[in-house]
Amino acid sequence: MKIFFTNAGLVILLLISLRAVTGENFDMQRHDMIAGIREMVRDTRDLTGKVELSERVYAAMEKVPRHEFVPGGMKQNAYFNSPLPIGHDQTISQPYIVAVMTDFADIDKDSVVLEVGTGSGYQAAVLAEIAQHVYTIEIIEALGLRARDTLQRLGYDNVTVRIGDGYHGWQEHAPFDAILVTAAAESIPAPLLEQLKPGGRLVIPIGREYSIQALMFIKKNQDGGIIQREILPVGFVPLTGEH
């Protein structure tokens, strides 16, 4: 992921804290990060239609130690409201984007969620603070194994990580209350729609690499039909695999 664009063309909107990052004062930094996300949500309300996000989303992000999901050399920047590199040409998502995607997924303690694109494991951890169980798939083995180790070390027993191609979903555990995709597809993957419960929500970036993409919200009706809307213009890495 992993850049948020404003309406003013290809302008990257990164809200970087001006406060110097010192020592291990991560709790205060995380609190400041949440405050920055709240401000950005208000600033983008005309795009998202949301003046504020759910308090359970903010509570989840307040609990998750983002510094545990970034490489050692990046820990001092862990609570900047920006994406950060995690190796293998991938990044940990911008916290604002994580918050927005989680909010649109509209999950609760009874939800079973699929994430396509585990990456660092950070988004899965945020989801796991709210949901009953999170199934997450990562196509890059080294990243998937590292995320699995981090999530297990931090006690996220309600997250199951699989190494593989997430385009086709995870049929064994379907249907899902919500599916989040953290890489851009050129069109909505049919298997993911099929694996949504009636009433389920899919949040996914759609578009080609190196172009402005659209973060989309799709809801599956009780009769199997779908409604969809564009949330934000974004820039994500491409969804890879055989499709």
Image (cartoon, rainbow, N blue to C red):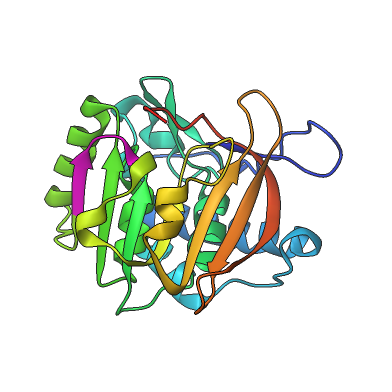
Residue 200 percent across, percent down from the top left? 45, 70
Q: Is residue 235 above or below residue 68?
A: above
> Going by the picture, which residue comes out furthest to the right?
8
Residue 141 percent across, percent down from the top left? 22, 27
Residue 104 vs residue 147: left or right?
A: right
- For this rendering, which residue is in front, 71 or 1? 1
Residue 134 vs residue 179: left or right?
A: left
Using the rendered view, name the quadrant where residue 226 is placed: bottom right
- For this rendering, which residue is in front, 153 or 4? 4
Magenta run includes residue 239: no
Q: Is residue 204 above or below residue 240?
A: below
Q: Is residue 155 above or below residue 200?
A: above
- At 54% across and 46% down in the image, what residue appears? 188
- At 22% across and 26% down in the image, what residue appears? 142
Tell how many labels. 0
Q: Which residues are magenta?
A: 160-166
- At 18% across and 63% down in the image, what residue appears? 158
Residue 215 vs residue 65: left or right?
A: right
Residue 117 seen in the figure: no
Residue 164 seen in the figure: yes
Residue 216 percent across, percent down from the top left? 62, 53
Quarter of the image where the C terminus is located: top left
- At 25% across and 35% down in the image, what residue appears? 164
> Going by the picture, which residue comes out furthest to the top?
88
Residue 213 percent across, percent down from the top left? 67, 38
Q: Is residue 13 above or below residue 176?
A: above
Magenta run includes residue 162: yes
